[in-house]
Amino acid sequence: METPLACGACGVLVDVTENEPTPFATLGLDISCNVDPKDARKRLRRFAHLVHPDYYTTGGAEQLALAEHNNALLNRAFDVVTDDVRRADWIVGHLGGPGEKDLGCMHQEFLMEVMEWNEILDDHEPGSPEFESLGSDLREERERLVAAIEGYLTPLPDPSTPEGEEALKDVRKDLNALRYIDRALTRVAGLPAPI
């Protein structure tokens, strides 16, 4: 089976409520930091034809509920697998790496940068040269961090080794930094800050 949610040959839904597959398994992919978004989208469309609730409206309440559950799993899997940050976060958790709060404190240097960003955001108007410059700097830093995360996770580190454990800690630190950058970028774009 290409996806554990349904049989592609006979079209029968599989009940995975007791043992939900990983986002990668749901899309028929190996766990990897490198995912081809076009391939993932093709898989989403192909598997949606197997599990979409519209195809099970006449199959009874139980079949419809199972289709809704599996369809939701498929969509969540796609969201995780195709988002650089969510994918890396999931991989770190899956490999037993530290959680967001385990390494929540940031370096003093970085926190000073965050304070400087907030001053610019508070003291200047959207569209100002200061906003534009900050936005450009933040996007560059975000790209650098995402590339660093991909480097740490390619190939996937072995968490049972000191090197692997350290790589997962480094990824977590970078993911925590990305949260600050994404909040600042949201403000640069003039959107309400995420909660």
Image (cartoon, rainbow, N blue to C red):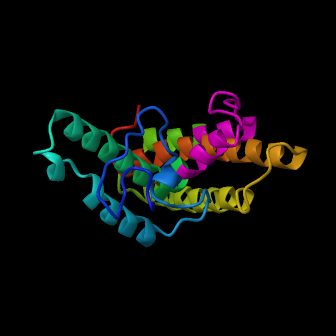
- Tell me the quadrant of the picture where the N terminus can be found: bottom left
Identified at 62% across, 45% down, the residue is: 175
Identified at 37% across, 69% down, the residue is: 42
In depth, the one of 85 and 57 nearer the eye is 57
Identified at 37% across, 40% down, the residue is: 15
115 is within the stretch colored magenta = no
- Residue furthest front as drawn: 10
- Tell me the quadrant of the picture where the C terminus can be found: top left
In depth, the one of 183 and 47 nearer the eye is 47
Identified at 22% across, 34% down, the residue is: 62
95 is within the stretch colored magenta = yes
- Residue furthest right as drawn: 162
Residue 189 in view = yes
Q: Position of residue 51 (x, y in %)?
A: 28, 52
Compared across the picture, whether 172 is left or right of 48 comes to right
Above or below, 102 relative to 88: above
In depth, the one of 135 and 161 nearer the eye is 161
Q: Position of residue 100 (x, y in %)?
A: 62, 33
Q: Position of residue 6 (x, y in %)?
A: 36, 53
Compared across the picture, whether 10 is left or right of 169 comes to left
Boundaries of the magenta span:
87-114
- Residue furthest left as drawn: 58
Q: Position of residue 163 (x, y in %)?
A: 87, 49
Residue 191 in view = no
In depth, the one of 59 and 178 nearer the eye is 59
Write down the quadrant of residue 128 in the picture.
Answer: bottom left
Please tell me how many numbered marks the rendered image carries: 0
